[in-house]
Image (tube, grey):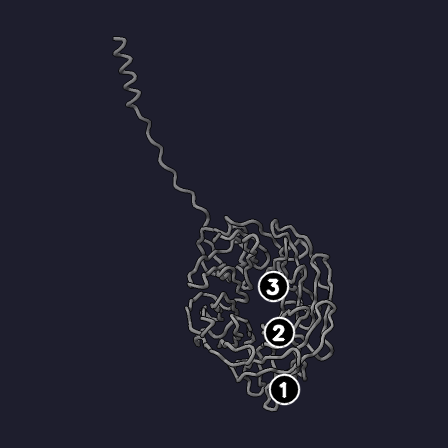
């Protein structure tokens, strides 16, 4: 009896299973946010990959937005802010690229004009930053944290357009004004070490009322005799007829005379000023308002031309990889051409307007607007589309990514961008 009783007790325990608890629903991260009337639902890869985010310093208000795209300088990242009022000047922020720690806050000494004026260029050479804005060029020693050179135009002349660094010289352009119009434009050579400069070639206004409007310097080539030919785009504008034309010219730097001048390549209107010149596998690729031309940089012979669709308005920014020439327009069109013959490889559409900077690394193009995008240049496949982590970090903010560019640091693979008042460092979700 005792044995049977124990068996029944054991059997009863084995059969009396506890009631299972219901499985709790999965916890969802906050997803939907509204930026400028558009809803975004994202898996927040940039938030998960965020290394640091830093606002402007307490000395600067949130009304002073970040401007020029980030630039990598060794172990640092250089950012800059725009002005708050008409009498203000740019401020540079040098931060540790790994931690975001502010190393140096600097107001340029010789740049008297706000750096949000047209034709502002920031370029890094070694441990120095070359800043070109309006009628000043300032060379800043980022290692010593001071201005090394301040270069100014002479009276009645104003620096304009971009610049190129060939050996120890900066090649850029300046224009002379006549009342409210351009009278002439000149290519100048500036010694990078001491700031001395000379006028190499001046283009004057013509009897047909076309005045030189600006110059786009982008590339150079070497002849068999060793002469260097500088290729640039030359827009000219007629203020009476209110339209312009674009030509290209190759300048021999030894003789200081044109080696060649092209035919008219394109027409332009007053509002469009975006011109780019690139050297792609031996060809000078020049973009104008609506066309892309490939020229022999030594002879000026036009090898091919391509025109964008009417609805894409104008070309805004470009980059290249191998024989692939990629550019964005002010409309939704995103084009990739075969640089050898101008054939269209593909056209993509993105719901965005003008972007100021395209950067490519190992065949992947990165750019930003309201999101950061990455596309494979060869195939045109979209590899990534990532929303701003600010929506999750700072709810209520309405800042979106700047259209001025996203930078990848080749040594770490990290991405750097800003959204107006904050700078971000993120691990690349593609890595």
Residue 205, disc: 1
Between 296 and 186, the one lying in front of the other is 296
Q: Secondary structure at mark 2?
A: strand
- Residue drawn at x 50%, y 80% is 302
* Among the two numbered marks 1 and 2 on one chain, the one whose residue lies closer to the N terminus: 2
The residue at the far bottom in this view is 207
Residue 206 locus on image (x, y percent): 61, 88
> Which numbered disc, 3 or 1, marks the residue that appears first in the sequence?
3
State the image coordinates of residue 276 (x, y, percent, origin top left).
55, 73
Residue 180 visible from this viewpoint: no
Residue 146 x %, y %: 73, 60
| Cα separation between marks 3 and 1 | 33 Å
* Label 1, label 2: how far apart the Cα atoms are: 18 Å
Labelled pair 1, 2 in contact (Cβ < 8 Å): no
Q: Earlier in the sequence, mark 3 or mark 2?
A: 3
Of marks 3 and 1, the one in the foreground:
1
Q: Which residue is mark 3?
A: 68
Question: Residue at position x 62%, y 56% from top?
Answer: 77
Res 346 → quadrant: bottom left
The residue carrying mark 2 is 161
Quadrant location of residue 40? bottom left
């Amino acid at each position: 009896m005792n044995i049977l009783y124990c068996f029944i007790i054991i059997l009863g325990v084995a059969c009396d299973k506890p009631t299972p608890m219901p499985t709790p629903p999965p916890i969802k991260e906050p997803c939907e946010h509204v930026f400028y009337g558009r809803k975004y639902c994202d898996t927040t890869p940039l938030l998960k990959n965020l290394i640091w985010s830093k606002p402007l310093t307490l000395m600067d208000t949130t009304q002073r937005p970040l401007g020029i795209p980030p630039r990598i300088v060794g172990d640092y990242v250089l950012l800059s802010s725009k002005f708050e009022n008409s009498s203000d000047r740019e401020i540079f922020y040098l931060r540790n690229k790994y931690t975001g720690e502010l190393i140096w806050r600097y107001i340029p000494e010789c740049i008297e004009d706000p750096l949000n004026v047209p034709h502002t260029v920031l370029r890094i050479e070694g441990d120095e930053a070359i800043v070109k804005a309006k009628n000043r060029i300032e060379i800043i020693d980022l290692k010593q944290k001071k201005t090394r050179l301040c270069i100014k135009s002479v009276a009645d002349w104003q620096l304009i357009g971009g610049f190129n660094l060939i050996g120890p010289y900066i090649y850029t352009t300046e224009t002379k004004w006549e009342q409210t119009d351009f009278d002439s434009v000149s290519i100048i050579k500036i010694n990078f070490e001491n700031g001395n400069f000379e006028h190499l070639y001046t283009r004057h206004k013509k009897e047909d009322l076309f005045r030189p409007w600006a110059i786009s310097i982008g590339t150079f080539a070497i002849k068999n005799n060793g002469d260097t030919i500088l290729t640039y785009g030359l827009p000219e504008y007629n203020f009476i007829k209110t339209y312009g034309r674009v030509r290209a010219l190759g300048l021999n730097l030894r003789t200081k005379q044109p080696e060649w001048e092209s035919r008219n390549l394109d027409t332009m209107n007053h509002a469009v000023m975006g011109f780019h010149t690139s050297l792609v596998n031996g060809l000078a690729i020049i973009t104008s308002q609506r066309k892309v031309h490939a020229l022999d940089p030594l002879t000026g012979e036009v090898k091919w031309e391509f025109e964008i669709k009417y609805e894409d308005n104008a070309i805004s920014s470009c980059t290249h990889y191998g024989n692939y020439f990629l550019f964005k327009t002010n409309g939704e069109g995103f084009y990739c051409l075969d640089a050898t013959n101008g054939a269209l490889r593909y056209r993509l559409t993105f719901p965005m307007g003008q972007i100021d900077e395209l950067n490519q690394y190992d065949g992947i193009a990165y750019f930003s607007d309201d999101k950061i995008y990455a596309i494979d240049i060869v195939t045109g496949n979209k590899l990534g589309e990532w929303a701003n982590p600010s929506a999750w970090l700072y709810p209520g903010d309405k800042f979106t990514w700047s259209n001025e560019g996203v930078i990848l640091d080749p040594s770490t693979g990290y991405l750097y961008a800003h959204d107006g008042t904050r700078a971000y460092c993120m691990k690349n979700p593609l890595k």
